[in-house]
Amino acid sequence: MKENQQGMDWQDRVIIGSVIAGALIIAVVLIKPQSQRAILSNNTLSNSSQTATQSTAKSKNVLTESEAINILKGWYNAKSKIFAPPFSRSLVAQYTTGPLYQRILEKSEEGSKGSQGWLKDRGCYYTYDFSNIEKVWSFKESKVTPLLKIIIYERLQLKGSSSHGCNSPLETYRKNVTYWFQQDNGTWKIYEYKITDD
């Protein structure tokens, strides 16, 4: 009987061991898909987060009306340092690009040095009493060249040598101006402008 009990103990141990091994295998099989589901779920969240980030980055490529207005406010505030001592080239580069940048720094109607160079060579400069954006007529969104139509109310004076035609009376005007913007190395800047009668 002792042999029978020992035989049963041995057989019981094998059966119990098999049941435990089977349970472990079943547990591994059941748990693995759940962890894969968790990984897939985390990947989905990660992909969703990347998509949201990309969409935010894309929206930064579009200039908003308020951003365009802020660029113009900065430009008008900087004009007294661009068209008068210290004749800041860095402010021109900060606010302008394309043809406007070239006209200010590179070439004027006379073919040399741009409008900033023309002023410096003649000992002339502008003073600005105020520059106010009175009204925004319209804004046209574009990923390439958005435009903003405004009314600007400005008082300025060209000062300097009378012999160079730079001593003019104070001028106050209200004009309709259309501004076009373009990105320059990821930064929106004023690309061109046109004064209109409408």
Image (tube, rainbow, N blue to C red):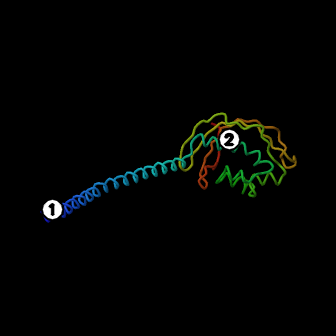
Residue 23 point in image, percent of width and height: 25, 57
Give the amino acid at mark 1: Gln
Q: Is residue 23 above or below residue 176?
A: below
Give the amino acid at mark 2: Lys
Task: Please give the name of the residue rendered at 60% of the width and 56% of the height, measured from the top-left corner.
Answer: 185
Q: Nearer the viewer, residue 186 or 6?
A: 6
Residue 60 point in image, percent of width and height: 54, 48
Q: Nearer the viewer, residue 197 or 15?
A: 15
How many residues crowd mark 2 within 10 Å: few (<14), some (14–19), many (20+)? Answer: some
Q: Quadrant of residue 197?
A: top right
The residue wearing badge 2 is: 73
Disc nearer the start of the sequence (1/2):
1
Q: Is residue 6 above or below residue 119?
A: below
Callout 2: SS: helix
* Residue most extreme to the front: 2
Screen quadrant of the N terminus:
bottom left
Q: Is residue 99 above or below residue 5?
A: above
Q: In the picture provided, is 25 more to the left or to the right than 68?
A: left
Q: Nearer the viewer, mark 1 or mark 2?
A: 1
Task: Please give the name of the residue rendered at 79% of the width and 48% of the height, measured from the top-left corner.
Answer: 84
The residue wearing badge 1 is: 5
Numbered mark located on residue 88 in the image: none
Q: In the picture provided, is 83 more to the left or to the right than 1?
A: right
